[in-house]
Image (cartoon, grey):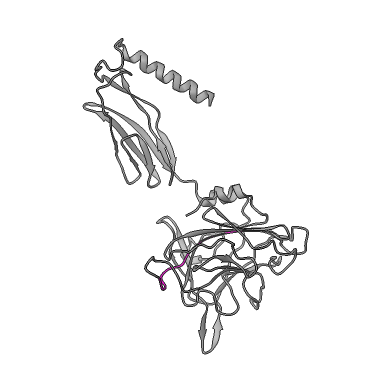
Amino acid sequence: MKTILFRSVCFLAACLALSGCEKKLGDGVTLKDIAVGEGIRVNIGETGRLYAYPVPYDCTDYEFKWESADPGIATVDEFGRVASVDVGNTTVYVSQGSIRKEFAVEVYEVTLQEKLNSLGVKGLWQFEDAGNLFKATVGNDLTPVGSGFTQGEGQNRRKKAAILPSSEKIDDVWHHNHLICNHGLAPNGGGKKVNEFTVIVDCMFPGGPTNAGNNWQNGKYYCLYQTAMNNTSDGDFFWRPSANFGVTGSYSKQEHLFVKDTWYRFAIVVNLGKSIKYFMNGQYYEAGNSGELDGDRAWLPEGVLLFADEDGENGQGFPLYVSTVGIFDRALSDDEVKSLGGI
């Protein structure tokens, strides 16, 4: 803070020196030059601010015009506020009449992968390789069970997604499409199973019945993971787009009506016997209870099933788009989850 204040004072002093004018504010002093600050770097999705000052500093006869050379990278408003649009570099100009100065603006992206890596992610899947859709970015590859898995578009044009077909009944037999995750996590939390973990999932459900408000009202379910490796029991975390998310006895206490064709980031933070916390797009939702150490919500050391449910509830005729799955061998803090942001 002291450094920023010192620089601001020095910059103002420079403007005063440039002015060379003893007239007081309001005397109708004419603009002779524009003094500008430095260019900026802005993370994608965020905003920044550029600063320009009249010379003489007490000039009253000016109105700066701001312009971006490439609005596809960043836009700028009449106050010098920069909104990032896409990754890249552009120039922003501030001018009045024949006087024009420029700023270098860089829009960069701290990717979700970089954020997850910084937190020590143990397994990460982003579905970017159409030829090997379930290849791991970190950890072991996923193993698909069933058929009909394809690649689609993720939440922006730089991301891809796996399209996971729903379970379907063929000749009176349920066919359960899901993924086997050999997570590699060791038993923890004081038990023989994986009792402490965090799961991050970016997902979206397309189409389906809606009401006039474009919201689901039909009670469909999506299961995000299942602890029984033989898929013979109910799943262990459901997303019910018509209401809430969790599992019987531990659904989120606050309901949220989800919108179709919209991406959501779920974080399930589990420390069995102590707490289970749910987050959606960085917002905390209280779970019903904390579960039991080595209970049926703990993960087996040999793995976990993703998007699996034993009785055909999963999707009920509608696919699920998934662009990211990340797992940790610990319960992330609230601040760590919130640092991942939302979609």
Query: Would you say 191 lies left or right of 134 here?
Result: right
In the current view of this chain or complex, which residue is farthest to the top? Answer: 22
- Residue 1, compared with residue 142, is above or below; it is above
Residue 279 included in the magenta stretch of the image? no
Query: Would you say 21 lies left or right of 240 here?
Result: left
In the current view of this chain or complex, which residue is farthest to the bottom? Answer: 171
- Residue 191, compared with residue 340, is above or below; it is below
Query: Would you say 93 lies left or right of 276 here?
Result: left
Q: Which residues are magenta?
A: 198-210
Give the total of numbered labels: 0
- Residue 46, compared with residue 127, is above or below; it is above
Task: Out of 147 and 156, give the one closest to the viewer.
Answer: 156
Counting from the top left corner in percent of width and height, residue 84 is at 39, 44
Query: Would you say 109 lies left or right of 55 here?
Result: right
Task: Out of 61 and 224, give the one closest to the viewer.
Answer: 61
Counting from the top left corner in percent of width and height, residue 276 is at 66, 59
Residue drawn at 52 percent across, 78 percent down: 167
Q: Quadrant of residue 296?
A: bottom right
Counting from the top left corner in percent of width and height, residue 134 is at 54, 65
Counting from the top left corner in percent of width and height, residue 73 is at 35, 44
Residue drawn at 55 percent across, 79 percent down: 312
Q: Quadrant of residue 47?
A: top left
In the current view of this chain or complex, which residue is farthest to the left? Answer: 97
Residue drawn at 50 percent across, 66 percent down: 133
